[in-house]
Image (tube, rainbow, N blue to C red):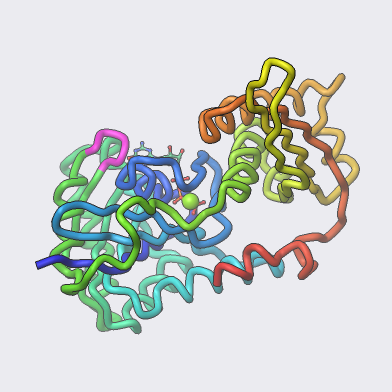
Amino acid sequence: MFKAGYITVVGKPNAGKSTLVNKLVGFKVAITTPKPQTTRFNIKGIITNENSQMILIDTPGVHIPKDKMGEYMMKNVESAIKSVDVIIYMVDATRPTIDKANETIMKNVADQNNNVILCINKIDKIEKGKILKIITIYNDYFKSIGGEFKDIIPISVYKEDGLDILKESIEKYLPESMPIYSEDDITDITERELIEEIIREKALNNLDEEVPHGIKVEVERFKKRKNRQKQSVYDIDVNIICEKNSHKGIIIGKDGVMLKKIGSQARIDIENLLQDKVNLKLWVKVRPDWQDNENYLSNIKSKI
Ligand SMILES: Nc1nc2c(ncn2[C@@H]2O[C@H](COP(=O)(O)OP(=O)(O)OP(=O)(O)O)[C@@H](O)[C@H]2O)c(=O)[nH]1
Ligand SMILES: [Mg+2]
């Protein structure tokens, strides 16, 4: 009996949702950083094995939106928890509190009347004795609003602890079905989008708080050609869009050092992805308030 279905991973920013999806898929479909609000739109990661096909949906971390981009990010989350087979509600073991964001998630999830698995991540960072207390905090609240976790699974994606138990639990709640995607499919993110995300990851990792959250990356040219030695080379021209002139200066850095650093780190990953040489050119442009401008949000909107 083959099983297949959709599993949405939802939770606050920085819980480790994308790290989990990447680990289970065995391929980096979503970028991950130590900074909150890394993921901006829903990304599917597909795992097909002998008995089942799991279509995981990684979602943006739930937060209170400050602009149109934030609103569309949250619409991505809302749509991803509707009519799926399993919801993994992921929390960070090092921050066990019921705040507004967690309340919102649990209320939305309880309304869906679904198979909800509470997944407590980063247990490598806490004493084992504390796990029971954390479980009680979330379980009591969820019960108080009429919800019920089907399973509660403490995990560490880093240590690969609990992941087999999680996979078994997911499979248990999937419906009997033929595979939905072909066996070779692993994601719905395009190469072009993945390249944009890789560059955004390097920007998030290298720049301080305020700047990288106001960045959008757009591939303008993506072309394969043969060089004189008859080797394949990709020419990739990319715009990094930011909100302010001062941010542009920070992104470029003194003598262009920061932009070079972001570019060379990204090029390594993009060459690995494309398995060919890459000639990457980055341009920084200022577009004030792009996060409230529909023209710049079409990719996030298209994933709702
Ligand atoms: N110690 C520890 N850190 C982890 C673990 N899993 C993920 N992390 C780290 O947690 C941080 C956030 O991970 P992400 O996967 O980007 O988190 P996310 O939930 O996708 O965040 P958003 O996209 O912002 O919603 C990164 O620095 C990860 O390396 C874990 O099992 N243990
Ligand atoms: Mg993420």
Magenta stretch prevailing secondary structure: loop
* Residue drawn at 21 percent across, 46 percent down: 163
Q: Compare residues 2 and 241 and report the one nearer the observer.
A: 2
Q: Which residue appears farthest toward the top when viewing the image?
A: 229
- Number of marks: 0
Q: Which residue appears farthest toward the left when viewing the image?
A: 1
Image location (x, y in percent) of residue 73: 58, 66
Q: Is residue 190 magenta?
A: no
Q: Is residue 158 magenta?
A: yes
* Residue drawn at 31 percent across, 35 percent down: 158
Q: Please determine whether, in this image, residue 55 is positioned above or below residue 273.
A: below
Image location (x, y in percent) of residue 141: 29, 72
**Image quarter hosting the N terminus:** bottom left
For this view, does 70 lie left or right of residue 190? right
* Residue drawn at 65 percent across, 30 percent down: 206
Image location (x, y in percent) of residue 114: 27, 78
For this view, does 256 lie left or right of residue 275? right
Q: Compare residues 212 and 238 and report the one nearer the observer.
A: 238
Q: Compare residues 266 and 3 and report the one nearer the observer.
A: 3
Q: Which corner quadrant of the image does residue 233 belong to? A: top right
Ligand 1 is found in the corner quadrant, namely top left
Image location (x, y in percent) of residue 303: 56, 67
Q: Please determine whether, in this image, residue 71 is positioned above or below residue 222.
A: below
**Image quarter hosting the C terminus:** bottom right
Q: Please determine whether, in this image, residue 208 is positioned above or below residue 72.
A: above
Q: Compare residues 22 and 153 and report the one nearer the observer.
A: 22
Q: Which corner quadrant of the image does residue 46 belong to? A: bottom left
For this view, does 22 lie left or right of residue 113? right
Bounds of the magenta span? Answer: 156-160
Q: Please determine whether, in this image, residue 11 is positioned above or below residue 277.
A: below
* Residue drawn at 71 percent across, 42 percent down: 222
